[in-house]
Image (spheres, rainbow, N blue to C red):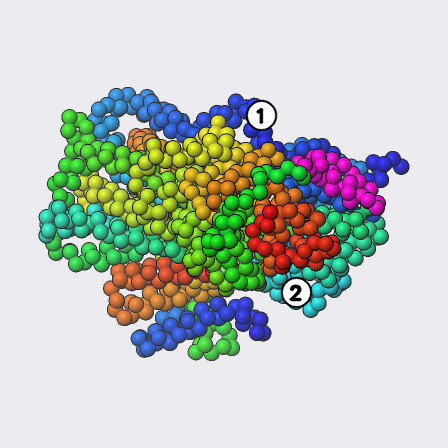
Amino acid sequence: MTRFISRNAWVIGLFVIFGLLLALTRVVQPDYGAAGIGSLVRAALPYAFAVAAQTVVVIAGGIDLSIASMMALTSVTAAVLMDGASGSFAILVVPLILLLGLAIGAVNGTLIVISRVPDIVVTLAMLFVWQGAALLVLEAPGGGAAEWLKSLLVGTVGIPGVPTAITEWIPKALIILVVGLAVVWVPLYRSRLGLSIYAIGSSNLAAFRSGVAVDRTRIVAYAIAGLFSAMGGLVLTMSTGIGAPIPGPYLLASVAAVVLGGVALTGGKGGIVGPIVAVFILRLVRSDLTFLAVDPNITTIIEGTIMVIVVMIGALFAMRRRAS
Amino acid sequence: MTATAQATAPISLGRRVRRFLADYPIVPLIVLFALLVVVLELLRPGIVNERWMANTVKFAIPLAILAGCQTMTMLTGGIDLSVSTAATMSAFIVATQSPIHGPAIATLIALVPGILIGFANGIGVGVFRVHPLIMTLGLGLIGIGALQVYQRTVIATGSEVPEVLAWLGTGLTWGVPNALLLFVPLAALILYTLRSTGFGRLLYAVGDNERATRISGVLYWQVILAVYVVSGLLAAIAGLLYVGLIKAPSLSLAEPLLLPSVAAAVIGGTSIFGGRGGYAGTMVGALILTVLTTLLTILQMPEGWRGVLFGLIVLVVTAIYTRITSEA
Amino acid sequence: MTATDALILEATGVTKNYGAVTALDNASLSVRPGEVHALMGANGAGKSTLVKILTGAIPPTKGRILIRGKPSQIHSPAEARRAGLVSVYQEPAIIPDLDIAANLRLTETPVDPFVSWVEELGVKDLDLHETARNVPLAILRVLDLARALAIEPDVLLLDEMTAALPANLAERVLDVVRRQSRAGRSVIFISHRLLEISALCDRATVLRDGRTVGVVDMAPGAEERIVELMLGAPVERSERVAAPPTAASSQAAESPPRLRARNLRVGGKLHDVSFDLHAGEVLGVVALEGQGQDELFAVLSGSIRPSGGSLEVDGQVTRFGHPADAIAVGVVYVPGDRVSALCMQRSVRENIALPFSARPRAWGPIPRRQENVRVDSAIARLRIDTRAQAEVHRLSGGNQQKVTIARWIAAGARAMLCFDPTRGIDVGTKREIYRLLRELAAQGTSVLLYTSELEEVQLACDRAVVIFGGRIVDTLPASEADEPALMRAAHGLPHAPPGRPASAAIPAGNPA
């Protein structure tokens, strides 16, 4: 038990900060309640999937700059496929988009492995490629989304036997998030493949000598990042009802949340829960600033400053670790 | 490892070619540039004339200056993704301040944010050792936020692009772009700095092997701080020139130049790992990208294809350089 | 049954080139079932490279490997494992950020045999859920070995397994190796410790400069034969590189020493190290791998701060926070690892001139003419072959090492800290470097010289200090610092032969 606490001290600390922030929000905005939580989760949803994607790659010792572009590509593809199509056709679209995400992520990984060019350059180049591809699919925001998909993000779920007083605090979007992440992450984390992802991030050489297929594992890590990006793209389409070919501001946000979430940029450490909580913290800070009637542009500055400071502190820790 | 030296072993022709290309990357670049011009002329006979050349040069110059920022920071193993913000800020500030203070003072004020951004980047990267990509991206975001706040305060004053900047950005004298008046000395200075000053030598050395510079008595943070400040300043200057060219200041003015500036440096043979490259190649890289854009426009290629091609070209060129330099 | 059938592992004609450098040149190795086979060779003879090739960690440039008489192509450690070949490397192949249990799952190692091997090897109270990063290196190596044993390999390769292990654990390891052999399994054993080898092994293959120079059956007297093979031609012990300095050492007694260390401490690596380095003296430092010499040089050169003790330069107490501080008072560092000292993609000239541009006031235009004079004279003095002027990585190893020294000849230095500057370079260049160090000393420069090649101490040094377990355990004048004496001291053995004065009685400087 004490080991659980000491291992997860960082994540527990994040939960505490989140709790404190919620309390603060309540003070600032006395009627902040279930509805507020609902909109917070909906706003955080695409960020959360972007962060999940970045987390997997960073744990594997890499970085992916093309996540926002992959989200844009999958989002517009979904919007175009569903535009004017029947609701039942959308059932086919969802797995198709997830497969597309997996495939384009795998392309990123394969190019990194084959070209021997550093991840940062390859994913920078692929940022253009996927963004361009998104524009080819859809030149201007448009398309559509099936009604039932849109409704998946709105409101709360009723669980038979549980009073509404409790279920109203569980927005559907949260369930989508938890299910989406858990379905991929839990089996992965428990498998040898998941271990391999941590292994190549922690020490490439030791991993190779331990019999890990380093290149294949790297490709898988990027493919999973693509999969999470596709989930992010899907929720974008679901929440707006259309697809937009211009990538959103998810790059810096995802890196900052990864660092704030206790995942070392040097790789091999951390999990997915921390970064997700970090996303919620960053989103909540933003809504708090809005409640405090701070100019939204100043909010951008504050947010950017927080992220930079967080990354700086993370770098300081990494420096300490290297020195010891 | 033993050092049973085999340096005298005969060197194969292929290896010699690779060595030559690694030493003089500018040769294939110029060939590539010439090829693109020929293709352009074949597609649209008569397009390659004096006016076209002047236009190409005019548009290549701001890109080449921003790519100079990338070249210098990349030599140290870094990158500067805040250059577009620094350029946009200087452009926007000069346009909004000159109705109040006149063009001269407005220009001086406009250079300040770029320097500040560079300073913050230098502290983050040099002292705290934040990954330059993240640091500069973050500062770019903060800068844009600050610019939005600033925009509110000057909404009443309106904006005008100082005439001297418009003259510099768009004007021609005897068919030669006036921008060269600024760019030629600037480029000469960058080339001279990289080749013949102690600072330039350290940029290469730090990017090549930081440990070696450390035991030679070099303080890493000093070099890094200086290079990012210089980069911020150069970006601000590029912004002044660009607003003179575009003549419509906006909050996303220089944004479309950011990734091309990285691409120009990469295509020009500067290694993103640091320690290898130079500004001559970067300038040709900027020209190549400008001509490529014209070509894609003439082919009426959709914007999407341009992005795809762009990314693939950067990737392929870097992959080729990686192979050449790892084996030569 | 022919001889070849009886071999479990046979490697012939194995060659490995790294660019222009040949690490292995037509090496061979054959191992019988149930045999403990020693792989011997001086530093850089190619032992580790051969092991890496056998286990698929790196591909050979040329060569043939037979396992149980069948040609086999092994491309990765995982394939080697499946073929029954498992290696325990010097750096444990354990993922630092995973716990032990996860490391076992990663390698699909059965837990129960692993745990019983761990106990057998003398590690108590192992917590399988401890993160590997928090486990001491010595224990990690034992765990790595236990993991290898748990899958019952036919051939076990141990690379310097007993180095850096406390005596009780090392003894257990040797026991286990013997039991493997009795069970009909083979062990390839790499070690610098000759006594261990002769007690444990059946045969020994000796490598020199990447070639197999002999296979020796272990029998009484075989040690001598192995040493002979490892060294090649008998060493000309008589030849001292330069005459013993007389003027410098007498002068030393009067002025304060160039460098005076008192009770230097670094974490658990270095304890109360005190010594004086005089003007015009070459002081040797002798130690086995990892006895704290790395930390000592790091402290003296300003790379790390000591956790205690003091440092004086010319009588002035100093604290170095960065190598720049040390360079400012003339204390410079020449690492043995050329990769960390040189900007490989830059020219010879630029590498030598690097310290000139270090401080911001020298960031302006480079005074070419002035600089060239100094650089050229350093190049001429060291006779650096600059035909491959373009980039340093195209030079031979010996020439690269000369560049690291030339840098400080050009920039000037009062005390030069050389850390194994002759590692892996040819004999001729070695001699040149020693001659140069002696010349520098004769001109008043102080040199602190760590060398891993003991026979070199008498050739180049005036005195030698021996470090063991982070402490200076002995100080010997050059006349007494022969290999056996150094070897004994470096292993922490007390002074033995009668008639030799106790070390404490030896005065600083060379009494000659």
Residue C9 place in picture, x, y as percent: 77, 41
Residue B95 place in picture, x, y as percent: 16, 48
Q: Are marks 1 and 2 on the same chain?
A: no
- Residues B198 and C436: in front is C436
Residue C440 place in picture, x, y as percent: 49, 41
Q: Quadrant of residue B9?
A: top right
- Residues C414 and C127: in front is C414
* Disc 1: host chain: B
* Magenta residues (range): C207-236
Question: Which residue is label 1 attached to?
Answer: B9
* Residue C33 visible in image: no
Q: Give the residue displayed 78% in from the left and 40% down from the top.
A: C225
Q: Residues within 10 Å of mark 1 (few under 14, many from 20)?
A: few
Q: Give the residue displayed 64% in from the left and 61% down from the top.
A: C100
Residue C209 lies in the magenta-colored region: yes
Image side of residue B85 versus residue A89, left or right = left
Q: Give the residue displayed 79% in from the left and 48% down from the top.
A: C198
Amino acid type at mark 1: Ala
